[in-house]
Amino acid sequence: MKLLTKTTLYFILIMLPVFAAGAYYLFHKFNKEIKHETDEELVNDQLEWLRYLDTASLDNPIFRFHTQEFQLIPTDQPIQKKFKLKGVNLYQETEDTQAPFRELSQVISIHGKNYQLILRKSMIEKDDLAKNIITVMLLAFGGLLVFVILSNWFISRNIWSPFYRSLDKIRQLQLNKMETLQFNRTPTHEFNQLNDALNQMTDRIHQDYINMKELTEDAAHEMQTPLAIAQSKLELLLQDENLSEEQLKNIGQTSEELQRLSRLNHSLLLLAKIENQQYPVTEQTDLHPVLLKYLSLFEELIREKELTVDTKLAPAAPWPLHPALADILVSNLLGNAIKYNYPEGRISITLTQTSLTISNTSNLPEIPPANVFQRFRKSNQGYSNSNGLGLAIVKKIGDSYRINIRYQYRNGLHIFTATC
């Protein structure tokens, strides 16, 4: 969950109970005030009626008048010094429903006789008024809550925008372009601290990258010279007719190991260059002519093993690869398919605009999935001339240029698929 979403959710969880409690308090307070005002009106009405009844005669029709809002009933109960207030529900015939009233009752004495005085006031209109006010309040509270949440979200997003810009720069980071990367100043002190730390970190990484790149190149070049000298000296020794057969055999083995060491040095240098992004993609490379070129170069090996090659090639397949890496990808996969095939075996090549599949028959068993692309991992059978880096280089090309490399073993076929 994103930090902005998380903070917004926490804010909502905190604000909803606060707003609900506030709305409940206001409703309760408003309802209490309405009841208080109604009770005051009833008390005032009672005082007016008491003044009037003190001057009225017993023959006055008021002593025989009864309504829902006014009743004067003769009673034997003792006189009450204090009136009583309460809420009651009375049946309304016109609406066929119970309606709320506030009621004041008291036993009073008029001309020496006791009467039950009951005054009532309808709460229907006041309840409707309360409901309308509560509805307006809830809408206002709801609108205010939405406004506060949206304001908080927009403000938070604006505040966090420098962080996301820095994050995007880190995601697009490339070692060979780090010297141009700068994290800018922001109005926020904490983000400035973060950007300063990132600037220092990228400067150190870039410097380490430059040092490693120079060390790798220098070491590779320095190694090539003594290797070439040693190889040339061994070739001269092989031409000496005074050497015994055993000596010639030992020199030949040493020469082979030197050649293997030279290839290993070249492969390690190539891996380092790929990892350091030293093969920028300026334009897409068409794999169709690359495949045709290597089929032609390997034609003699294919004919020597009497292999059957089935091809299904798209007319054009532009891939986001440096031309040198396209050559390496195709030559390694096709070279392995030829090298580890058996005589009169079969190779199948399928090329589309987005995928390349090369499958081959072989007497070798399935390569363990955990080892297939690991460096210096090779089978005990059939890989004696390999330095164990061919497939590792293919995998590194795929990882560096967003090309998915997969290996499958199905029906006796070793299948390698590259998908861009």
Image (cartoon, rainbow, N blue to C red):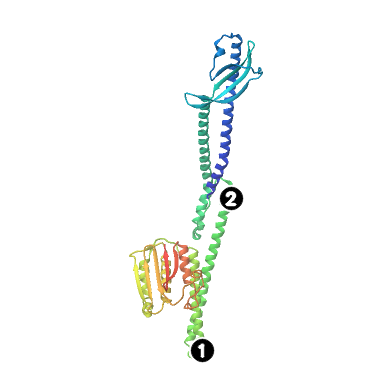
Give yes or no for contact between labels 1 and 2 (Cβ–Cβ under 8 Å). no
Q: Is residue 131 above or below residue 194?
A: above
Q: Picture coordinates of residue 327 (x, y %)?
A: 41, 69
In this orientation, does residue 228 appear? no
Q: Amino acid at mark 1?
A: Glu
83 and 273: which is toward the camera: 83
Label 2: how many Cα within 10 Å (few below 14, some 14–19, many 20+): few
Q: Is residue 113 left or right of residue 210?
A: right
Element carrying mark 2 = helix
Element carrying mark 1 = helix
Q: Amino acid at mark 2?
A: Gln
Say which label, 1 or 2, has the lower sequence index: 2
Q: Which residue is mark 2?
A: 193
Q: Which mark is residue 153?
A: none
Determine the residue positioned at 61% across, 10% down: 54
Determine the residue positioned at 58% across, 41% down: 14
Looking at this view, name the residue that lies furthest to the left. 315
Q: Quadrant of residue 25?
A: top right
215 and 60: which is toward the camera: 60
55 and 395: which is toward the camera: 55
Q: Which residue is mark 1?
A: 246
Q: How many marks?
A: 2
Q: CA distance from mark 1 to mark 2?
A: 70 Å
Q: Picture coordinates of residue 266 (x, y %)?
A: 48, 72
Q: Is residue 155 above or below residue 339?
A: above
Quarter of the image containing the C terminus?
bottom left
Q: Picture coordinates of residue 168 (x, y %)?
A: 50, 53
Label 1: how many Cα within 10 Å (few below 14, some 14–19, many 20+): few
In this orientation, does residue 20 appear? yes
Q: Picture coordinates of residue 392 (x, y %)?
A: 48, 69
Q: Is residue 235 above or below residue 127?
A: below
